[in-house]
Image (cartoon, rainbow, N blue to C red):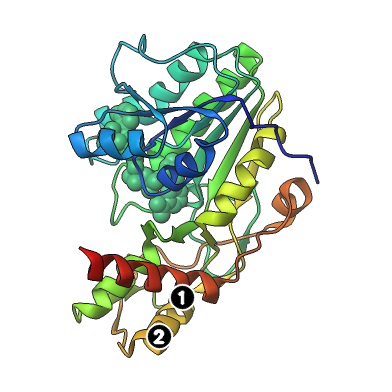
Amino acid sequence: MMTPAPLDGARILVTGATGQVAFPLIQSLSPRSTVYALARFAKTRDRQRVEAAGAIPVAADLAGDDLSAIPQDVDYVVHMAVVKSGDFGYDLKANAEGVGRLMSHCRKARAFVHFSSTAVYAYTGQQLHAEDAPLGDNHRAMFPTYSLSKIAAESVVRFAAREFGLPTTIARLSVPYGNNGGWPWFHWQMMKAGMPIDVHPERPNTYNPIHEDDIIDKVPYLLSAATVPATTLNFGGEPVSIEEWCAYIGELTGLAAAYRDNPQAFGSLQIDPAAMHAAIGKTRVDWKEGIRRMIAHMEQQSTHS
Ligand SMILES: NC(=O)c1ccc[n+]([C@@H]2O[C@H](COP(=O)([O-])OP(=O)(O)OC[C@H]3O[C@@H](n4cnc5c(N)ncnc54)[C@H](OP(=O)(O)O)[C@@H]3O)[C@@H](O)[C@H]2O)c1
């Protein structure tokens, strides 16, 4: 396993900084690094949240032409911005062309991590997906532009890593969750509302949920794993199915999950973690502990609001 990139005192650009995955990261990095937090900042509240976290807001639209607000002399880039508006033109421009222009702009950085998704893999039932598994339009049913623009973005990233000699890791994230939300949180909300949860009929529907603390812990390792040409790694925790995490949410809350078989649902998307474990090590947060903490945190927040 690698040694982590030295982030203390470093200048780090985090894109998608107001999002589910990046926000806890900027909160964790800001006390010890200079964090530039990029988003469009459509909502004023987001700018305040980012400033309160100790990061420096950088407003830019990655689908736009003007990236001049983005500092070029950063040490590291963690690229988490994503848009899934459903408009292919805009989403490909922001997600695929956008990352290319960002890498061109920040080509002097020591390392670049591009957050991709296991949504780039074709559905193949219960099989494990290694990094060379077939790709496909996995998330079409719910997010029409998502898988294709994540696949397109990866190709642009590989090109740019070589073109600019910029050491790069592509991290194919499974299911991020934690105190800032995530798919298990959505399922909990659906259980509260008595809404059926669509699952693929080929059960169980297994993924590799990864807690926000593990994402924060692993970012320095993902940066140190960066190479030219780019390294591609799956990025997830231990395998857990939707059925298992909903049953556990039920145990904690007394709610029951109602399932609806839907062959269009994403279906199992389990990673082969071998390359990830060899390069950056295993995750640490036990999934039940992570879900317990998520529920306790959200319940505490709702009693204070
Ligand atoms: N969440 C998941 O379940 C999941 C699973 C697998 C992989 N991932 C990957 O993990 C990364 C983070 O996902 P997330 O769920 O945290 O995303 P998110 O919550 O949807 O947040 C997206 C972020 O990107 C920014 N953004 C959107 N369009 C932009 C544009 N045109 N220019 C600049 N910034 C833009 C948004 O802020 P503004 O709207 O203010 O611009 C926001 O900060 C993404 O790469 C995603 O594909 C996520």
* Residue corresponding to mark 2: 252
The mark that comes first in sequence, 2 or 1, is 2
Tag shown at residue 292: 1
What's the amino acid at mark 2?
Leu
Q: Is mark 2 in CB contact (under 8 Å) with mark 1?
A: yes
How many numbered marks, from 0 up?
Answer: 2
Residue at image coords 31%, 72%: 299
Q: Quadrant of the C terminus?
A: bottom left
Q: Quadrant of residue 224?
A: top right
Residue 302 spot, x, y in % from top left: 24, 68
Question: For disc 2, does the CB lie below 8 Å from ligand 1?
Answer: no
Residue at image coords 57%, 13%: 107
Above/below status of 196 relative to 132: below
Q: Nearer the viewer, residue 45 or 259?
A: 45
What's the amino acid at mark 1?
Arg
Residue 15 spot, x, y in % from top left: 42, 31
User: Local crowd at mark 1 within 10 Å, few (<14), some, or many (≥20)?
Assistant: some
Residue at image coords 44%, 60%: 177
Residue 279 spot, x, y in % from top left: 75, 45
User: Local crowd at mark 2 within 10 Å, few (<14), some, or many (≥20)?
Assistant: few
Q: Secondary structure at mark 2?
A: helix
User: Looking at the image, can residue 196 be seen?
Assistant: no
Q: Secondary structure at mark 1?
A: helix
Q: Nearer the viewer, residue 201 or 142?
A: 142
User: Looking at the image, can residue 101 be seen?
Assistant: yes
